[in-house]
Amino acid sequence: MKTYIALFRGINVGGKNILPMKELVSILESLGAKNVQTYIQSGNAVFKMAAENTAQLAERIQTEIDSQRGFSPQVLLLTLAELKKAMADNPFPEAESDPGHLHLGFLGAVPAQPDFAKLDQLKMESEEYRLVGRVFYLHAPEGVGRSKLAAGCEKCLGVSMTDRNWNTVCKLSEMAAD
């Protein structure tokens, strides 16, 4: 059995794409997942499953949610090793003491032609960012809600992204390690 961390994009936000976590657990279990745990309502799950192709598994999860709920959220699957590597590669370790303002944007693919010039234009003086493989690290001390960089980075990167703050990343890592 392999441990997976599932990051769902765009569920239970603003009253749209409602998916209660109990129902998400049921959906994952119907696909063969074991020991399913969820974390906060915005779509994070940790589970064990026989080793599979992660892209195919993500597609199976999307399809099942669509058939049961009528919408198909983006699902990004990580292994525990991938999550731990993203944490270890954090280029802003000093920002870990400010975990609500340190964000990891998990990307659907490595960006082919990221627009770094535009990213730099969007960046506030207090912000720092770094792209490392399939993770976009952002330290936004004034908060992502006020950050033009946070709002525009996905378009500049040219690939889909789902973002989690350091608190959430640490909690998911802890859950997956148990």
Image (cartoon, grey):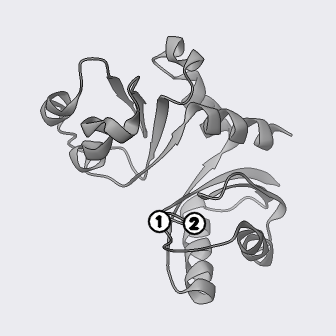
Between residues 36 and 148, which one lies in front from this camera angle?
A: 148
Mark 2 or mark 1: which is in front?
1
Left or right side of 173 for 67: left
Where does the image place residue 157, in percent across and percent down from the top left?
A: 26, 44
Amino acid type of the residue tagged 2 in the rendering: Ala
Which quarter of the picture shows residue 44? bottom right
Amino acid type of the residue tagged 1 in the rendering: Gly
Identify the residue shown where x is 47% and y is 65%.
14
Left or right side of 31 for 93: left
Tell me the element at label 1: loop
Tell me the element at label 2: helix
Disc 1 packing (10 Å; few <14; some 14–19; many ≥20): few
Identify the residue shown where x is 48% and y is 28%.
101
Quadrant where the image shows the C terminus: top right
Image mark for residue 58: 2
Left or right side of 11 for 39: right
- 60 relative to 12, above or below: below
Sequence-wise first label, 2 or 1: 1
- 19 relative to 75, above or below: below
Between residues 65 and 79, which one lies in front from this camera angle?
A: 65
Q: Which residue is mark 1?
A: 14
